[in-house]
Image: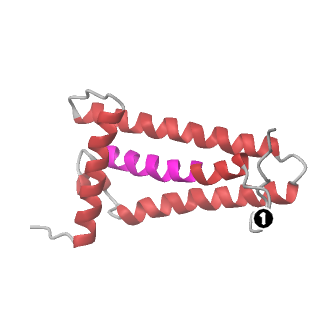
């Protein structure tokens, strides 16, 4: 019998709860594992599409800041590497399907969607701006004031 470290059990439970919440939030009425996997991966694809749109919009809105945009591109590549490495740490087995079962694609997509949503919110800072006078804003522009 395989024993699981407590942290892994907690993460697995968290991902399973996330999968259930995902199904209810998307209105999914999937009845098979394949359908649930597809629904979860569609949610990730939507989050990934939003990430790419926000990223492209930042690049378009900062055309006169090549030093920033070059570093943002490097940061985004590093984030993708982090995301992938993090997922490998959560699911380290070489044969993921055999080790984690038929729900692995669902769990993978739930984890990817969550990481991606967090990154989207981080990136939106460059689009939303910060309050005028914020001294630690770095490359993030102040919010436009509307009178």
The x, y position of residue 92, in whole percent, is 35, 64
The x, y position of residue 9, in whole percent, is 22, 64
- Residue shown at 36% from the left, 31% from the top: 26
Q: Main secondary structure of the magenta part?
A: helix
**Residue nearest the viewer, comparing 130 with 5:** 130
The span picked out in magenta is: 105-120
Q: Is residue 78 left or right of residue 147?
A: left
Q: Is residue 72 left or right of residue 113?
A: right
Instruction: Give the residue at the far left of this rendering.
Output: 1
143 part of magenta stretch: no
- Residue shown at 65% from the left, 38% from the top: 53
Instruction: Give the residue at the far right of this rendering.
Output: 64
Instruction: Give the residue at the far front of this rendering.
Output: 147
The x, y position of residue 36, in whole percent, is 29, 35
Q: Is residue 96 left or right of residue 115?
A: left
113 part of magenta stretch: yes
- The residue singled out by tag 1 in the image is 138
- Residue shown at 76% from the left, 49% from the top: 143
Disc 1 crowd, CA 10 A, few/some/many (<14, 14-19, 20+): few
Tell me: residue 73, above or below residue 113.
Answer: below
- Residue shown at 42% from the left, 59% from the top: 87
The x, y position of residue 54, in whole percent, is 66, 42
Q: Quadrant of the C terminus?
A: top right
Q: Classify mark 1: helix, strand or loop.
A: loop
Q: How is the image coloured?
A: secondary structure
């Amino acid at each position: 019998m395989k024993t699981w470290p407590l942290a892994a059990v907690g993460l697995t439970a968290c991902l399973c709860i996330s999968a259930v919440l995902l199904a209810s939030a998307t209105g999914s009425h999937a009845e098979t594992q394949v359908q649930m996997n597809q629904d979860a991966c569609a949610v990730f694809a939507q989050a990934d599409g939003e990430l790419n749109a926000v990223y492209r919009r930042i690049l378009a809105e900062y055309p006169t800041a090549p030093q920033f945009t070059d570093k943002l591109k490097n940061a985004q590549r590093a984030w993708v590497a982090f995301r992938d490495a993090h997922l490998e740490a959560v699911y380290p087995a070489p044969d993921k399907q055999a080790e984690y079962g038929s729900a692995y694609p669902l769990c993978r997509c739930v984890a990817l969607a969550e990481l991606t949503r967090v990154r989207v919110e981080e990136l939106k800072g460059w689009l939303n701006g910060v309050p005028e006078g914020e001294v630690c804003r770095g490359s993030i522009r102040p919010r436009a004031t509307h009178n």
